[in-house]
Image: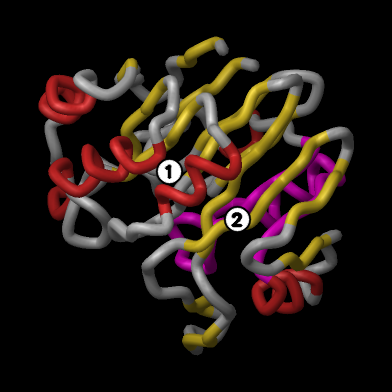
Amino acid sequence: MRIVWLGHSAFLLEGSKRVLIDPFITGNPMAPVSAEDIKADVILVTHGHGDHLGDAVEIAKRNNALIVCIHELSRILAKRDVETMGMNIGGSAFSSGIRVTMVPALHSADFEDENGEIISCGAPVGFVVEMDGVKVYHTGDTGLFMDMKLIGELYEPDVMLVPIGDFYTMGIREAVKAVELVRPKVAIPMHYGTFPLIDADPMEFKRLAEKICKVVVLKPGESYEV
């Protein structure tokens, strides 16, 4: 599997299928590509905030891709003429040869419609994606919580994609503890540097977390192969 960082929390997992996660591309100053350039078979959305839902609907329409998200958000997105699969926390599903497990995240979750109205749309989540024998845990936007240890024990992710930007999510200190709880083979930091409020030093995270596992710091557009 090839894991490509598209900036912020957006990743493209390339293997037998293309799995796109939280495709905030348009308006993302770190995005190395345009939304029109992205091809995907399945799109995973952790919650309805604009910097995570991003271009999911437009990319799904262009690629005839399935959007997987929490049930309440799936009902909203289905009205936009895209195919959705609404799941809930603790459940697993198979789609296009990919196993997707929805796990908890500690954050808020709402959706802004075309009229600027804020709509509650279920809980924020993370995903464990298994494809081609590799398991990737995308935490979504989250604070630190002890049940991350259970996620590590149950699903044994090879790679953990973990936010370090603080303010809206975990900072470096909490992210290192999260890695300690989950015990992945590899950790990749995300959700930092996009805006001044979430500036963080990924090399400081690497210095601290490499006592636990391998840490790979990517620049937007760079990839890591598992």
Foreground of the two, 97 or 47: 97
| Lower position in the chain sequence, tag 1 or tag 2 | 1
Q: Please identify the quadrant where the N terminus is shown.
A: top right
User: At which x and y percent is residue 224?
Assistant: 48, 13
Q: Quadrant of residue 172?
A: top left
Foreground of the two, 25 or 9: 9
Does the magenta portion include 61?
Answer: yes
Tag of residue 9: 1
Tag of residue 45: 2
Residue 25 is at least partly visible in this image: no
Q: Amino acid at mark 1?
A: Ser
Magenta segment, which residues? Answer: 41-70
> How far is mark 1 from mark 2, CA to CA?
10 Å
The residue under the point 71% across, 73% down is 71
Locate residue 128 relative to residue 41 in the image: left or right: left
Locate residue 37 relative to residue 150 in the image: left or right: right
Mark 1, secondary structure of its residue: loop
Locate residue 10 relative to residue 177 in the image: left or right: right
The residue under the point 33% across, 16% down is 214
Locate residue 28 relative to residue 21 in the image: left or right: left
The residue under the point 32% across, 20% down is 213
User: At which x and y percent is residue 99?
Assistant: 77, 40
Does the magenta portion include 107?
Answer: no
Q: How many marks?
A: 2
Residue 43 is at least partly visible in this image: yes
